[in-house]
Amino acid sequence: MSAIAKEPQPTGAFGEVLVVPGTILGGKYEVDEIIGEGGMGIIARATNIDLHTTVAVKILQPKLVHDEIALARFLQEARGVSKLRSPHIVQMLDVNSHPPEPPFMVMELLSGEDLDSMVVRRGKLPAKYVIELVLQACAGVSVAHAARILHRDLKPANLFLSRQDNGSCILKVLDFGLMKAAPSADVKLTQPNDIFGSPSFMSPEQISGETLDERTDIWALGAILFELVTGVPAFGAETIPQTLVNIATREPPAVSSLVDDVPLALEAIIGRCLAKERTARFRNVAELCAVLEPLRSPVDLPALLSGAPLTRSAAPLGDPAATLDEPLARERETTEVRVRRKPARLRGVLVLALFGAIVGGVIGLVVYSSKSDRSDEPVAKNVSTSASVATSAPSSVPPVAETALGSNVSDLPSAPVATARNNVVAQRPAPSVAGLASSPPSSPASSAPVSSPAPVLVAPPTEPRPPPAAHSTDPYPEFGRRK
């Protein structure tokens, strides 16, 4: 059957043609079967009669062919996607917008499964598979953002895991029907306060009809991460209005409260993607990829398309601080290290202070004892007894001292003699004192052996003085009267 109606159609107008298997579109695409249908269009598998290749054809819904906005949006998707070159975006091959046939676009035919159907079939997916899938989705979305195109309808149903001819799998982003391109002189497709998108994956600013930027797609990617990991929507509700209220006013449940084996870093990433204020989210897809990449690990994507059970080995743990700004994370880490090291450093200071106090106390005690011994030492009673004490302790006075002193010890004043190395003090005999009858015992210091042969400091010899007069009352006649 031909796509052209049997009766002539008015020139310049689209005919409402029923597309069924066997319909030929554009004179070369024969419809094989209808494989899907949505609000905007019908998806069919078709064969290029000239090239004998199989393609996918998206046909605008017959009820929308006379809707100027719907037609403009349909053509915008075809033209926009045709400019994007990425293995992670479905490839646009052709488009037709000439009546009387309905508008249609031709794309590569994919074999595999979209992620929405996969979650329905399998339930929640292991974190390491989710990370790989979303990273590949980010690769496609980043190409669109670089071309100043917002998707605005990212969701699991628009992410397709495609099986390649070599048996490998790759994820592709589909359905740019709600894409928002850079401002142009064409028909204005979005009016103020217009709301477009799938409710469960719409950002708060998308719900309120605000001007959108890349961060609205970041929100959707966070909602996709949440649902793939947990198996449930982040803001699920029984009705669409309640879902929108939850998105605008409530926080999603903690991922770790629903799943046990999700890395904390991934939970932090999801939380930042779903921040109510767009300024708190990742600024672009590149930032999101930068924190997801360290969590990446090798996975067997073809296993997702099979019925085989998946291994739930944990993904790399990562660092939750990676979702923060680098300077803030480094400052927090530095502060923690400083706090941890402070007690150890304080203990070391206290030990050194205690040791110093003990050593200082011992030295002070020795010095004090030495001074006490010298102050309590009795004064020699007479010259003869003192001389005998001095000569009876040869170990306390080196030979050089004897040579310097000679035998007339009574001619020298009483003075302590100390070695230069060990500060051992040897008391010299004091002069006799008139009126004293007994001789004191020798000082312990005078009999202590000198451990080092260091020179002894002594007073120089003086000339003998004549004995004082008998009537003198000077208690120290040997020193003469002080002037």
Image: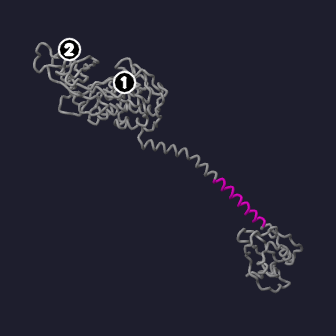
Residue 442 image-quadrant placement? bottom right
Q: Residue drawn 20% across and 26% down? A: 95
SS majority, magenta? helix
Tell me which numbered mark, 2 or 1, is placed earlier along the sequence: 2
Taking the magenta stretch, the answer to whether it contains residue 359 is yes
Q: Name the residue under label 2.
A: 18
Residue 395 percent location from the top left of the image: 81, 72
Contact between marks 2 and 1 (CB within 8 A): the answer is no
Taking the magenta stretch, the answer to whether it contains residue 228 is no
- Amino acid at dot 1: Leu
Q: How many marks?
A: 2
Along the line of sight, the residue nearer the viewer: 14 or 375: 14
Residue 76 image-quadrant placement? top left
Examine the rendering and report whether any part of residue 220 can be seen.
no
Query: In what quadrant of the picture does the C terminus appear?
Result: bottom right
467 vs 423, left or right, is: right
Query: In what quadrant of the picture does the N terminus appear?
Result: top left
Query: Tag 1's secondary structure?
Result: helix
299 vs 91, left or right, is: right
| Residue at the extreme top of the image, as rendered | 7
Q: Residue drawn 61% across and 48% down? A: 347
How far, Cα to Cα, is label 2 from label 1?
30 Å
Q: Any mark on residue 115, and which?
A: 1
Residue 439 percent location from the top left of the image: 87, 72
- In this picture, is 348 found above or below 23? below
What range of the chain is rendered magenta?
352-373
